[in-house]
Amino acid sequence: MSEQGLAAFLADGSVLPRESGISDRPMKGAVPFQSPAACKVTVTLPYHGPITGMGIKKGITLFVGGGYHGKSTILQALEMGVYNHIAGDGREYVITDPSAWKLRAEDGRSISHTDISPFINHLPNKKDTVHFSTEDASGSTSQAANLKEAVESGSKLLLIDEDTSATNFMIRDELMQKVICREEEPITPFIERVRSMYDDLGVSSIIVAGSSGSFFQIADTIIQMKEYIPYDITERAREAAASYPALKQQEHFPVSDNMRAPKANQALKKDPRLKMKTMGTNEMLLAKDAIELRYLEQLVDPEQTNALAYALKYLELNRMNGSRTVPQLLDDIEVLTASKGLSALYDKEYVRSGLAMPRRQEIAACLNRYRKLYFN
């Protein structure tokens, strides 16, 4: 994929829909995936031979179409494409950049010391958006923080569904800009930053949209889903968009000097028997502090949640010192587990359940949702 400049790949013949909302089995009788001719690529695998499918190039890709035609199904398959699949799953050769992050709004989450100023500035009461903190984020502030934290963790691909996004974060149409002037609106919408994010940061975006055609003007590739079959409509959509006023694009993505380096919660070091508890993939407790994980859609196994709890405890007790940045802390966990395994996270403790390795992105997300995250 990297050699061909691809952010994702979906093999022809893949069965993308699932059996039900509570089952990961492939749906019987589902329409097999078939790549549009313009996006078709062939790769040769050592123990498989040639395999053909849709190559999604790095940049900005837009999936559009009517309701129930397969847009969100494609995105959900790509979300899980960061993991390997067992034979018979139907998505064995749906492959996504391993750093891909499902970006969404997350009302009510806590945010600590995060620079959301590229998207949100001059808030009422002169609230600092370069070092933004809140115990109860709105849709737009949570999505801005989720994006910046994903980039901080090293993500190079954002997966975005219009249905789970904050509308005012994503777009701001011409009529609204005429009625509410730009100086009165603190939000610079994602649509004005998405191009510079790719040009300056190398962060690609795959976007699902069903109600707004604004993204036609900035997308590199536009795919229409019709009865679960993808069609390349890039040229037709661009011609239709040409008669509309050009969207304003921010020339460069701002470089942040907010290098977040959390310090330890000293109260935790007083109790060597620090208690932890996990509730599936929805929530975990460190001491008495709850960490909400239910909106981390790429966290798939309760044993990953168990490992997240031990990783957070390890960082609190051993690595957080106010000088090591968040990316350095993530590096510490990756280096430690790669050399010594997950058992290095819990020293000589008795572990009552299994552990499975979470991605770097989920470790960062857990850390960022910890309400006792302290900074100098």
Image: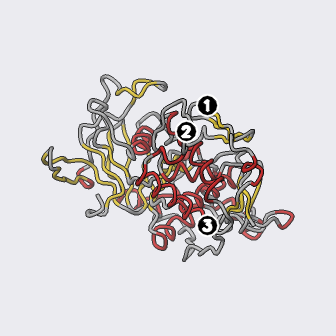
77 to 111, vertically: above or below: above
Label 2 neighbourhood size at 10 Å, few (<14), some (14-19), many (20+)? many
Label 3 neighbourhood size at 10 Å, few (<14), some (14-19), many (20+)? some
255 to 367, vertically: above or below: below
Task: Tell me whether circle 3 and circle 1 mark residues in contact (CB < 8 Å).
Answer: no
44 to 16, vertically: above or below: below
Query: Which label number is shown at residue 324?
Result: 3
**Closer to the camera in the image, 343 or 366:** 343
Percent across and percent down for residue 292 are 66, 40
The C terminus lies in quadrant: bottom right
Residue placed furthest toward the front = 348
Percent across and percent down for residue 341 are 43, 47
C-alpha separation, residue under disc 2 versus residue under disc 3: 24 Å
Percent across and percent down for residue 326 are 59, 62
Nearer the N terminus, badge 2 or badge 1? 1
Say which residue label 1 marks: 279
Task: Tell me whether circle 2 and circle 1 mark residues in contact (CB < 8 Å).
Answer: yes
Nearer the N terminus, badge 3 or badge 1? 1
Percent across and percent down for residue 124 are 84, 63
Say which residue label 2 marks: 305
Q: Is residue 23 left or right of residue 347?
A: left
